[in-house]
Image (tube, rainbow, N blue to C red):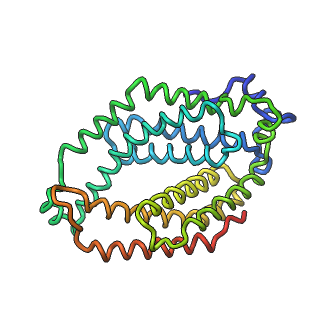
Amino acid sequence: MQSGPSARTAKRSRPAGRNNRKLAPADMDCATAFQLIARDCLAKMDAQRLGTIAGNEEALHQTRVAISQLRAAVAFFAPMTSDAAWPNIESEIEWLYAILGEARDADVMAALLRRKRYRKWAKQVGAHDPMERSRLYHRVAACMRSARFRRLTAELSRWVERGPWLMRQDESAQRHRAVPLKAYRQQKLKRWHAGLVRKGRGLAAMGDKPRHRFRLKGKRYRYALESLNGICAASDRTRLRRLQKPVRDLQRALGDLRDLQRLRHIGTSPSRPPGYREHKKELLADAGEAFRGIKQTPPIL
């Protein structure tokens, strides 16, 4: 992967009046902020590649997290990052993410079925398939060794460093890139927070599909907060971490609920796992409490 733009590209990508000094968080512009976040995501993907190929569950999980963080960052800076190249790149990312996701789901289900409360039930419904994980990880390894994967990572790196979003010289594009991160961050987080609160109304009574969409919206908000935490001034990090906690709790509760519901469709004889109704009620209560925490912590930085 490329570690950075050429001197010529770097000069062109900065707003007028910038020199090559390292920008302090107080005067960081959106283009610089996005590149810092995106480079970090690409570095994480690269660092986890061999572990993922080797079948390491945590490496695969961290690869998916890095991809999710990158996609959240692109969405967060959408007025600036939207360009003609991104849709094709995103399509390839979705291909990769889907393959990783199947293996990750299998790992999560296997971990659930090893719990004491589900072991006997899992044996009764024939939930265990010893060859499934091997098959899915073989597919993951083939994917991450492929020329298609190498093309994707190379194209991502080129896009981050000198994609159309960065090279456009029209006034609107330059203005979007030059917006101070601090001002943009405040406005965007408020908008995402308001949208999350609006979508979360009636959480307890939501159907599966609306609740899944709401979970993804919360996940995107969380990853944006985490990425910003990595590049912002120390004085902002405590507040950002405080904002992350209820969103992280919401994602965990809704993710566990999704996994619980998926257990009903595992094995040859679909049935409710033991304690299903009570566990679902507990997880919905946890999600509701986390959502109240989100409403009570607006993103004021």
Residue 282 percent coordinates (x, y): 38, 76
Along the viewing direction, whichever of 236 and 289 lies nearer the viewer: 289
Residue 120 percent coordinates (x, y): 15, 66
Along the viewing direction, whichever of 16 and 72 lies nearer the viewer: 72
Residue drawn at 24 percent across, 64 percent down: 115
Quarter of the image for residue 147 reads: top left
Residue 129 percent coordinates (x, y): 18, 49
Residue drawn at 33 percent across, 33 percent down: 141
Q: Looking at the image, how many numbered discs can be counted on the residues?
A: 0
Residue 2, above or below 284: above
Residue 204, above or below 86: below
Residue drawn at 42 percent across, 37 percent down: 96
Quarter of the image with the C terminus is bottom right
Residue 272 percent coordinates (x, y): 23, 68
Does residue 129 appear to the left or right of 108 in the view shown? left
Quarter of the image for residue 33 reads: top right
Along the viewing direction, whichever of 294 and 195 lies nearer the viewer: 195
Does residue 266 appear to the left or right of 4 in the view shown? left
Residue, far left: 124
Quarter of the image with the N terminus is top right
Residue 76, above or below 31: below
Residue, far right: 17
Quarter of the image for residue 169 reads: top right
Residue drawn at 71 percent across, 54 percent down: 185
Does residue 180 appear to the left or right of 206 in the view shown? right
